[in-house]
Amino acid sequence: MEFTLLIVIIVLALIFDYINGFHDAANAIATVVATKVLTPFQAVLWAAFFNFLAYWVFGFGVADTVAKTAHTMEINLVVILAGVIAAIIWNLLTWWQGIPSSSSHTLIGGFAGAAIAHAIAVHGFSGYMVDGTTQYWYNIVSWYKAGKDGGMPSGVLIIIAFIVLAPLLGALISYLISIWLLNASKKSILPKLFTVALMILTIWFVESQMLYYDAIEKPRFDSHFWSVAFEAHNIKWFLVAFIVLSVSCFCLVFSSLNLHQATASLKRMQLLSSAAFSLGHGGNDSQKVMGIIAAAVAVYIHTSGVAQVSLPDWLQVILPNDDLKIKGVMPAWIPLACYSAIAAGTLSGGWKIVKTMGSKITKVTSFEGVAAETAGALTLYFTEHLKIPVSTTHTITGSIIGVGLTKRISAVRWGVTVSLVWAWILTIPISAILAALVYYLLSLFL
């Protein structure tokens, strides 16, 4: 029975990943479709390809954060099943209404809500003992954990904080990129000096983040050069450098281009920026499903009494534990299946949300598209580096608002924006309540 539940959870998690693909496809393709750089079909092919390519770029930091949303030693498989079912229901409802809500927060809310419902069902509202300390129903969720050695803290409260911080960060970066591009279009030496300084600063910063051969735990090649070049950690920073340096090169020649040449160049750059954002979308959102699958395997081992070594090779999943210095293990089929599912979902499109993102928030030209997608991609890369599962939807929406603000405050349709913000705020609590109800319903039969 337990093993059957585990398989059902894995299948449903991949279905959720597929739904996430077509639900969030709009994030990467809305601006290239709105500006007619690509047809809708070309755009989803483009985005799906880079969703899948993310498999070779990103690690499993976000997956680890999601897997530890609830304490896996205190829940059962019904909790995870309820969370995934609730997330699927909410995603389909918001997709049907054309609301670009966060698939990430739907999953986090569903997982946390079902875990709390389980704790109340088992222990009630009174305290209970775990490892010699008194715990309460709300302690089953990992709300906050301080960062190691002054690093970034984790937990559901940090994820909730980034409901606000991710779009604000996206808006700020896109606003600054827009101002940079606008000044670069003027025949003045100061913007060019600023651009050259930024290029030097970018090269220095990316070089400082690189992992060289001696620091790579498992080099892929005997060659030092190829091992460094194809290390996943390094590829991500190469991409950051490539994005910033590409925009910088355009800024250096922007003032010498006529209107037709500038528009043509910006449209070509949109292909780069949408590809970069699609990579970030694939890397960020696929990992969340990996985290759910990893948590399900951990719970299965705990509740069934099956020893880790007796599991088949394809289920040898181990959650990392920095405190115990345990390295995480993830069989190759899990990330491969997750990235494939999200890419297939992206291919299916999500045209209702494309309309909202591409035209209802603010009028988007190639100029705004480049700024918004570049800002969104950089935000996703940095938050993934910090192992924070942010919403790609919130990030690109904030970025689109940021470029709208460079024209004038009234250029942003605030009525639409306020409706989106309400959807964002309500996603986690509604998903949690829905998951709790699904958990109680499933508990009657399982």
Image (cartoon, helix red, strand yellow):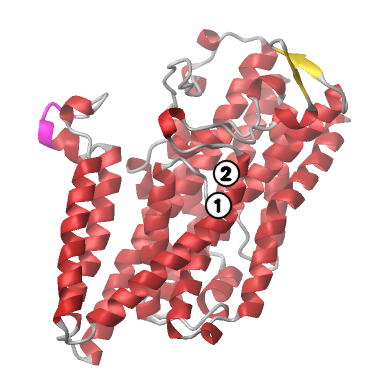
Residue visible at 60% across and 34% down in the picture: 10
Q: Is residue 250 visible?
A: yes
Measured from the top left, where is residue 50 in percent x and y?
Answer: 37, 55
* Amino acid at dot 1: Phe
Indicate the secondary structure of the residue bearing disc 1: helix
Q: Is residue 1 left or right of residue 211?
A: right
Q: Tell me where residue 118 sits by quadrant.
A: top right
In the picture of the structure, the residue carrying the numbered disc 1 is 162
Q: Is residue 410 left or right of residue 95?
A: left
Q: Is residue 195 magenta?
A: no
Quadrant into which the C terminus falls: top right
Q: Which residues are magenta?
A: 221-225
* Amino acid at dot 2: Ile
In the picture of the structure, the residue carrying the numbered disc 2 is 158
Measured from the top left, where is residue 116 in percent x and y?
Answer: 77, 34
Q: Is residue 292 left or right of residue 122?
A: left
Task: For the residues labelled 2 and 1, say whether their Cβ atoms are less than 8 Å apart.
Answer: yes
